[in-house]
Image (cartoon, grey):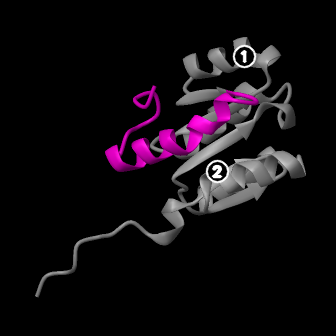
């Protein structure tokens, strides 16, 4: 008797948010549906190590000065998990640099954020790796 084919676990469909702002957290949770929120970078990395999320979304305002370190830690922990960046217009050059460093894509607030759900959906359906969803 053979085992049933492996299916994607419920936990794999959630999106992990690194965001302290209550307003931004509420907006992102509405946009992405199933989300787990962490206020600190350390909490986020530990959560990713415990269970692979569908994606990780970093709010640049909450990780100022540690962006590249956090991205590198997440990529080392789960290289198959795409990491997306949320940025203010003035932080767009930094966000572009993070894409060069391995983030899957970035979204500039306020209007660009509304393409996030479709981006996540397309990446999940295609099983894309970071860098392929751009």
Q: Of helix, strand and loop, which one carries label 1?
A: helix
Mark 2 or 1, closer to the camera: 2
Q: Residue furthest left?
A: 1
Whether 56 is drawn above or below 130: the answer is below
**In the image, residue 126 lies at what x, y percent?**
33, 44
Q: Position of residue 123 (x, y in %)?
A: 42, 42
**In this orientation, which residue lies closer to the viewer: 66 or 21?**
21
91 lies above or below 123: above
Q: Is residue 47 above or below residue 56?
A: below
- Give how far across and how far down residue 28 sits, in percent: 71, 49
Quick check: 1 left or right of 38? left
Q: Which residue is mark 1?
A: 92
Q: Which residues are magenta?
A: 108-134
Check residue 58 in the rendering and tell me which mark sits there, or answer none: none
Rendering coords of residue 74 (x, y %): 62, 41
Q: In what quadrant of the picture does the N terminus appear?
A: bottom left
Residue at 65% across, 29% down: 112
Query: Is 50 inside the magenta-drawn segment?
Result: no
- At a point 46% along the width and 34% down the height, the residue shown is 130
28 or 6: nearer the viewer: 28
Farthest bottom residue in view: 1
Distance, label 2 to label 1, CA atoms, is 21 Å
10 Å crowding of disc 1: few (<14), some (14-19), many (20+): some
The answer to which of marks 2 and 1 sits earlier in the sequence is 2
Question: How would you rate the neighbour count of disc 2 (Cα within 10 Å): few for under 14, some for 14-19, many for 20 or more?
Answer: some
- In the rendered image, residue 119 lying in the magenta stretch gets the answer yes
Determine which of the numbered discs, if any, sits on residue 31 in the image.
Answer: 2
Point out the residue furthest to the top here.
Answer: 93
């Amino acid at each position: 008797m053979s085992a049933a084919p492996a299916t994607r676990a419920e936990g794999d469909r959630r999106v992990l948010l690194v965001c302290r702002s209550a307003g931004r957290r509420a907006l992102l949770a509405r946009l992405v549906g199933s989300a787990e929120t962490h206020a600190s970078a350390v909490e986020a990395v530990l959560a990713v190590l415990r269970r692979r999320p569908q994606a990780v979304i970093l709010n640049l305002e909450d990780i100022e000065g540690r962006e590249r370190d956090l991205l590198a830690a997440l990529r080392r922990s789960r290289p198959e998990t795409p990491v997306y960046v949320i940025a203010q217009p003035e932080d767009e050059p930094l966000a572009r640099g993070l894409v060069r460093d391995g983030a899957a894509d970035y979204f500039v607030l306020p209007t660009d954020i509304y393409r996030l759900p479709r981006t996540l959906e397309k990446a999940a359906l295609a099983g894309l790796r970071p860098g392929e969803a751009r």
